[in-house]
Image (tube, rainbow, N blue to C red):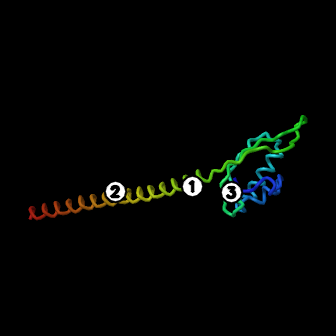
Amino acid sequence: MVGYKPEEIKDEFDSWIKLLHPKYRKEVVNYAQEYVKSAGKEEFEMEFKMRHKDGHWVDILARAFMAIDKKGKPIRMVGTHVDITERKRVEAKLNDKLSELNKMNQLMVGRELKMIELKQEVIKLKNKQKNSNEDVFKK
């Protein structure tokens, strides 16, 4: 998923941390440490980016559970990573389209409000003209 062969990277927490995107590193490490402290009582699931061997970033969904000994002490986190890059790309595209639709909606609402204002202005002018005509006939 991130391009490394098993022998190219150590199966250690620090190796995993080094591959995390700096933007997510602190949050992911804190979340993992809290998970370990809880002895796996909570669910471990989060999304972040990891550096691929060739340098690009891969969007990852991580899920894990805690392997514990008979005394309830954490032994190891065991989990999976799923490449969600395509899902993130589609989400970004959908968000862009939604943003476009919101802008169009705002324009339409603005247009409708302007039409209401203009109609009210026309009514005022007609009433003014009507009152003016009535004044002429009164004289």
In the drawing, does residue 125 fall left or right of residue 1?
A: left
Question: Gap in Å between the C-alphas at discs 3 and 2?
Answer: 44 Å
Mark 3–mark 2 CB contact (< 8 Å): no
Question: Gap in Å between the C-alphas at discs 2 and 1?
Answer: 35 Å
Q: Residue at x 59, y 52 (%)?
A: 86
Q: Position of residue 127 (x, y in %)?
A: 20, 59
Q: Position of residue 51 (x, y in %)?
A: 71, 60
Front residue (pair 2, 42): 2
Q: Quadrant of residue 68?
A: top right
Q: Is residue 53 above or below residue 72?
A: below
Dot 3 or dot 1: first in sequence order is 3
Mark 3–mark 1 CB contact (< 8 Å): no
Q: Is residue 123 above or below residue 65?
A: below
Q: Position of residue 138 (x, y in %)?
A: 10, 62
Residue type of the residue flagged with mark 1: Arg
Q: Quadrant of residue 133?
A: bottom left
Q: Can you tell which mark lies on residue 89?
A: 1
Q: Which residue is mark 3?
A: 49
Q: Which residue is mark 2?
A: 112
Question: Gap in Å between the C-alphas at discs 3 and 1?
Answer: 13 Å
Q: Residues within 10 Å of mark 1 (few under 14, many from 20)?
A: few
Q: Position of residue 139 (x, y in %)?
A: 8, 65
Secondary structure under the numbered disc 3 in the rendered image: strand
Residue type of the residue flagged with mark 2: Glu
